Image: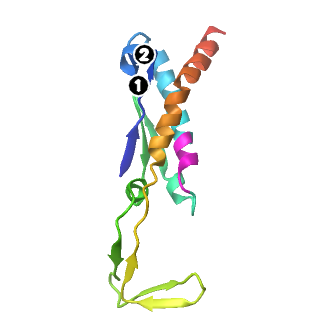
């Protein structure tokens, strides 16, 4: 399972230092809002061949922290990439799949070239960090009005 904890800092203070200056209700609202931004950034940054990976993203929010998780079992391989490897049938005598040409292929093994890493969660965290000040300003404006 791949997970990412969203942390942010503003004006030279760590998030925890800044958060310690707020009451728990404001802190919870801020964490919830930042987690929402992080969730959508991860959702839209995820590769979309079938959409399963993006739909498996969940957010878990507590009072002072939030975690964005990818529940799809293969998420770790998308984020970290894979080395070249051999694929063999499990519980069958051969692999069967449709080639790009459209014809059916039956074989005892496939030499997979591997995949490049796609650190979409890191990119989502970076974009979220860039938006923390705006999220806080919006929340502050709502509370003042």
Residue 42 lies in the magenta-colored region: yes
Does the magenta-highlighted stretch encompass residue 109?
no
Q: What residue do we see at 38% from left, 55% from top?
A: 80
Label 2 vs 1, first from the N-terminus: 2
Res 15 label: none
Image spot of residue 41 (x, y percent): 55, 41
User: Eyeballing the image, is 22 above or below 29?
Assistant: above
Mark 1 residue element: loop
Q: Distance between the residues labelled 2 and 1?
A: 7 Å
How many neighbours does mark 1 have within 10 angstroms: few (below 14), some (14-19), or many (20 or more)? Answer: some
Q: Residue furthest right?
A: 145
Question: Residue 24 got which mark?
Answer: 2
Query: Which quadrant, please, contains the C terminus?
Result: top right
Left or right of residue 112, residue 102 in this image: right
Q: Quadrant of residue 140?
A: top right
> Horizontally, is 36 left or right of 142 in the view?
left
Q: Please identify the dominant SS of the magenta region.
A: helix
Please provide the residue range marked out in magenta.
Answer: 41-47
118 relative to 1 in the view: left or right? right
**Which secondary structure, mark 2?**
helix
Q: Mark 1 points at which residue?
A: 63
Q: Do the residues labelled 2 and 1 touch (CB within 8 Å)?
A: yes
Tell me the crowding category of disc 2: few under 14, some 14 to 19, or many 20 or more residues within 10 angstroms, Cα based: few
Up-down relation of residue 97 to residue 1 (above or below): below
Residue 130: give x, y in percent of width and height.
53, 29
Q: Residue at x 36, y 89 (%)?
A: 108
């Amino acid at each position: 399972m791949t997970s990412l904890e969203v942390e942010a800092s503003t004006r030279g203070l760590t998030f925890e230092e800044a958060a310690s200056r707020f009451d728990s209700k404001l802190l919870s609202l801020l964490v919830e809002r930042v987690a929402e931004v992080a969730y959508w950034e991860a959702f839209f940054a995820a590769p979309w061949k079938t959409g399963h990976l993006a739909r498996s993203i969940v957010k878990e929010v507590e009072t002072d922290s939030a975690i964005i998780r990818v529940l799809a079992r293969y998420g770790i391989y998308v984020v970290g990439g894979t080395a070249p490897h051999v694929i063999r049938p499990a519980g069958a005598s051969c692999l069967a799949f449709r080639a790009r040409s459209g014809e059916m292929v039956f074989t005892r093994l496939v030499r997979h070239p591997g995949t490049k890493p796609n650190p979409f969660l890191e990119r989502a965290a970076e974009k979220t960090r860039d938006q923390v000040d705006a999220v806080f300003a919006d929340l502050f404006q709502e509370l003042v009005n």
